Amino acid sequence: MDTEAKAKVAVIGAGIVGLTTALQLQRAGLSVVLLDAQGPGSGCSRGNAGHFATEQVFPLASIAVLRQLPAMLLDPTGPLRLRAGYFFKALPWLLRFVANVRPSRQQALQRALSVLNAQALPAWQRLLPQAEATDLVQFRGALLVSEQPGLIDLAQTFRQYKEAGISVKWLEQAALRAREPALSSQVQGAIEFPEVAHTVDPYALCLQLYQQFVALGGQFRQQQVQRIRPCSNGYQLDLVPEPNIPQSGPGELALQASQLVICAGAASHRLCADLGYQVPLEAERGYHLMTQSRPLQSPVSSLERKFIMTPMQHGLRLAGTVEFAGINSAPDYRRASVLLQHANQLLAEPTSANPAQEPWAGNRPSLPDSLPVLGAAPRHPGVYLNFGHQHLGLTWAALTAEITGALLLRQTLELDLSPYRIDRF
């Protein structure tokens, strides 16, 4: 068996970001090898909320989140959870997170998020027909609902979105019930985001992108990249063959690429460290639970309960919790089960968990400033970075793939990438 193979471009990571990137590069005529220790779309891309959340232009760091820190340590099923045993390991990340609460910093981060969000759906609208995946995405808007009498907090949130330039509509209870009759009378009103979308099956979307990539001649290897090393012809990737996994070719022990793109999600900082870049990336765990019924027409989020219900092909997906516990810790599936209790408070008719689909947990790649790492590596020609999309991996995937493709092909970019540079830390 050969111990080394050569590829022109290697894309590390086969989540939604890596898949869109690999497909974009392959369509541009490059020879691409996509690598991942798991199958295509098997991580967070399989279990996300399915919401193209272009309305989310506010950084996660805020005074409100800081006030929740004591509760984070006490409530194991709350919407925001920091396991007590992980506090000191997470502390350096949390200190960077707190530094982004300053008003001037908030404004700069909001501008950088808004730039990406404004271009995200147009990028998907260009990609979906090419990937023959238009049936997997629906443009039905989304709702943010409140159970608060008087809707004072929702009104404040509505003003914040309006001031941020987000397209929003105010729905009183009667208008809301006409739009989503399956919601309970406990829901008092809502904000509608008419210009967002959702996918009815995130995993099917990933597989469709993967199939298009392979049909265009792209190669996939289910192997973990253990280490990246510069070499005379570019970069050598030391690989760990996965046992008993059929490959599209021999399972090499190393692969040489003239150019590479790091899209490895929550493992990206480890690969960047091989090249001397220290990235404060934290694995932020999310959970979901699938229900048997699908009573809603579009995604519905709860202002008070901090979760989302998204209608999909196989039921309603309940998602949205945040947990800091370390990438290798065991999931706490109580956090998924509690989502069903929340859903049944918001729905007029109770629903139940789908017994055919187990609760899910996955690790989002989150950075303390809520921005991704995007662009060329400053000290390593031929290395490109496209990771750290936190809650917006699905939202930004098509756009950041286009940006990465333009960089590799040395095309002119109108977008200023300085807010997303890896050396901003």
Image (spheres, helix red, strand yellow):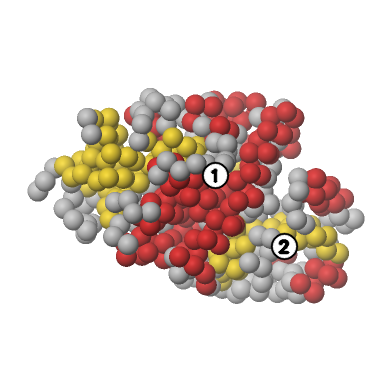
Q: Residues within 10 Å of mark 2 (few under 14, many from 20)?
A: some
Please state if 199 lies on the left or on the right of 115 as rendered: left
Residue type, mark 1 in image: Gln
* Residue occupying image coordinates x 74% and y 37%: 64
Q: Is residue 320 left or right of residue 245?
A: right
Q: Quadrant of residue 198?
A: bottom right
- Residue 420 vs residue 123, the one in the foreground: 123
* Tag 2 residue: 194
User: Does residue 115 show up?
Assistant: yes
Compared with 198, 243 (above or below) is: above
> What residue sits 65% from the left and 63% below the top?
299
In front: 361, or 282? 282
Q: Does label 2 or label 1 sit earlier along the sequence?
A: 2
Structural distance between the alpha carbons of marks 2 and 1: 23 Å
Which amino acid does the dot numbered 2 rest on?
Pro
In which image quadrant can residue 209 be found? bottom left
- Find residue 390 and name its label: 1
| Residue under the image location 31 percent in, 45 percent down | 9
Look at the image and tell me whether residue 291 can be seen.
no
Q: Tell me residue 382's x, y (percent).
A: 35, 36
Residue 326 in the image: x percent, y percent?
47, 38
Assess disc 1: are there few (<14), some (14-19) or many (≥20) residues with their C-alpha within 10 Å of its C-alpha: many
Position of residue 230 measured from the top left corner of the image (x, y, whole percent): 27, 30
Residue 278: horizontal and vertical position, in percent? 44, 26
Q: Residue at x 63, y 39 (%)?
A: 112
| The furthest residue to the front | 412
Q: Is residue 117 left or right of residue 29?
A: right
